[in-house]
Image: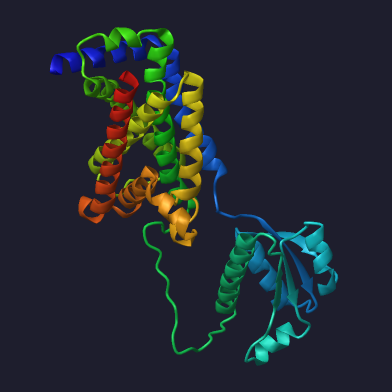
């Protein structure tokens, strides 16, 4: 069996090396995609335009406006005549927030106990509305400190941000992109292997040789594991170089578990290859069945707990759901294997199941 397996692997490697241009596309395409998606997909907000209605016209009101202007989140868009002009400002998209400073602002600051400043927010995009409200509250807090205003309270909140202290959304998205690209490229690699044999007429030569279907399937998967590992290393190094995404945990553990994920993706590609009638159909099936589910239902963008119950069940069948927990845990939190053992076992189980179905389908094809 080992000699026949080695022969199949050698044949597949020759196929891969002879198609050198396709190999380069497969290796370089993920690097380009992670650069494009990494810069394009972000929740970090900057330069949110805000207008000001200053009815106070005092040094204190100008100090408050300067506090907003110095904050990197807001961009001063100009003064508005009155608070009633806010709706027109929002309709014309000249600003996302209007700051209304009352006439007695300076006097109320001096005499206390409090002064109310109105903040009108265009919450057409609910995320923008939430961020604007949060950042505005932070600017008010810093302004109060600069004015020597301390509000007494029974309890205070002292937040401490762990694992992503700079709160960069790229640190959250890039591991998801790695999962998406590894699944897509690895499945694409093997999705055309059997259909290519069928189209080129070499499948009959393999079928008449004394080789077991299990040897054919495993012999076709193993060479692509090496390419998938090189692909994964390129993607991770590119993510670290372009976005500064850290690898806090063990790189060796990340490599080993990524190989498990690559194996699952390659097995999935092989399963598609046993179903599709041509290489074009195989590639189309691979793209449709990997990108959208991974993007929408694996926890890449949206929390799984927030999804309807039926979609949560679907997400549990996706390999990327478990790999995302693994890669984010290792890269951002530095977790060990004991912390992600259930996800690792689930991933390995899905891979074994898909490979078994692919072998079964290949036997059916032989019959």
Q: Position of residue 357 (x, y in %)?
A: 31, 33
Q: Position of residue 83 (x, y in %)?
A: 81, 73
- At x 41%, y 56%, the residue is 164
Is residue 165 depicted above or below 320 in this figure? below
Q: Position of residue 118 (x, y in %)?
A: 71, 77
The answer to whether residue 244 of the structure is visible from this angle is no
Is residue 228 depicted above or below 208 in this figure? below
In the rendered image, which quarter contains the N terminus?
Answer: top left
Total number of numbered labels?
A: 0
Is residue 197 depicted above or below 303 in this figure? above
The answer to whether residue 143 of the structure is visible from this angle is yes
Left or right of 211: which side holds 57? right
- Scheme of colours in the image: rainbow
- At x 58%, y 79%, the residue is 144
Name the residue nearer the viewer: 60 or 202: 202
Residue extending furthest toward the front: 367
- At x 57%, y 42%, the residue is 40
Name the residue nearer the viewer: 229 or 249: 229
- At x 72%, y 88%, the residue is 107
Name the residue nearer the viewer: 143 or 251: 251
Left or right of 269: which side holds 217? left
Name the residue nearer the viewer: 170 or 277: 277
In the rendered image, which quarter contains the C terminus?
Answer: top left
Is residue 140 depicted above or below 103 in this figure? above
Q: Position of residue 346 (x, y in %)?
A: 28, 48
Left or right of 64: which side holds 167? left
| Residue 323 quadrant | top left
């Amino acid at each position: 069996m080992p000699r026949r397996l080695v022969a199949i692997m050698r044949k597949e490697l020759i196929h891969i090396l002879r198609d050198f241009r396709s190999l380069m596309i497969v290796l370089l395409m993920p690097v380009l995609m992670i650069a494009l998606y990494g810069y394009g997909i972000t929740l970090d907000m900057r330069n949110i335009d805000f207008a000001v209605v200053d009815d106070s016209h005092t040094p204190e009101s100008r100090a408050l406006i300067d506090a907003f202007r110095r904050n990197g989140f807001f961009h001063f868009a100009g003064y508005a005549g009155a608070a009633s002009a806010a709706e027109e400002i929002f309709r014309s998209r000249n600003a996302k927030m209007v700051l209304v400073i009352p006439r007695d602002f300076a006097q109320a600051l001096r005499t206390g106990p409090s002064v109310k400043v109105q903040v009108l927010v265009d919450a057409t995009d609910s995320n923008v509305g939430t961020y604007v409200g949060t950042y505005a509250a932070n600017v008010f807090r810093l302004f109060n400190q600069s004015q020597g205003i301390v509000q007494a309270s029974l309890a205070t909140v002292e937040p401490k941000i762990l694992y992503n202290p700079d709160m960069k959304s790229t640190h959250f998205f890039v591991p998801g992109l790695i999962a998406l690209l590894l699944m897509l490229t690895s499945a694409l690699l093997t999705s055309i292997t059997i259909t290519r044999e069928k189209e080129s007429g070499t499948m009959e030569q393999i079928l008449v040789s004394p080789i077991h279907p299990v040897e054919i399937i495993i012999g076709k998967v193993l060479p692509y594991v090496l390419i998938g590992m090189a692909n994964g290393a390129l993607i991770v190094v590119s993510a670290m170089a372009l976005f500064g995404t850290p690898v806090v945990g063990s790189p060796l553990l990340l490599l080993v578990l990524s190989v498990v994920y690559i194996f699952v993706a390659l097995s999935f590609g092989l399963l598609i290859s046993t179903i599709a009638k041509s290489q074009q159909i195989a590639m189309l099936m691979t793209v449709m069945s990997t990108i959208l589910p991974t993007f929408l239902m694996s926890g890449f963008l949206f929390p799984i707990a927030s999804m309807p119950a039926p979609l949560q069940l679907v997400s549990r069948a996706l390999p990327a759901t478990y790999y995302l927990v693994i890669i984010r845990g290792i890269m951002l939190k530095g977790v060990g294997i004991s912390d992600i053992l259930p996800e690792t076992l689930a991933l390995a189980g899905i891979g074994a199941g898909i490979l078994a179905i692919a072998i079964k389908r290949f036997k059916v094809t032989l019959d």
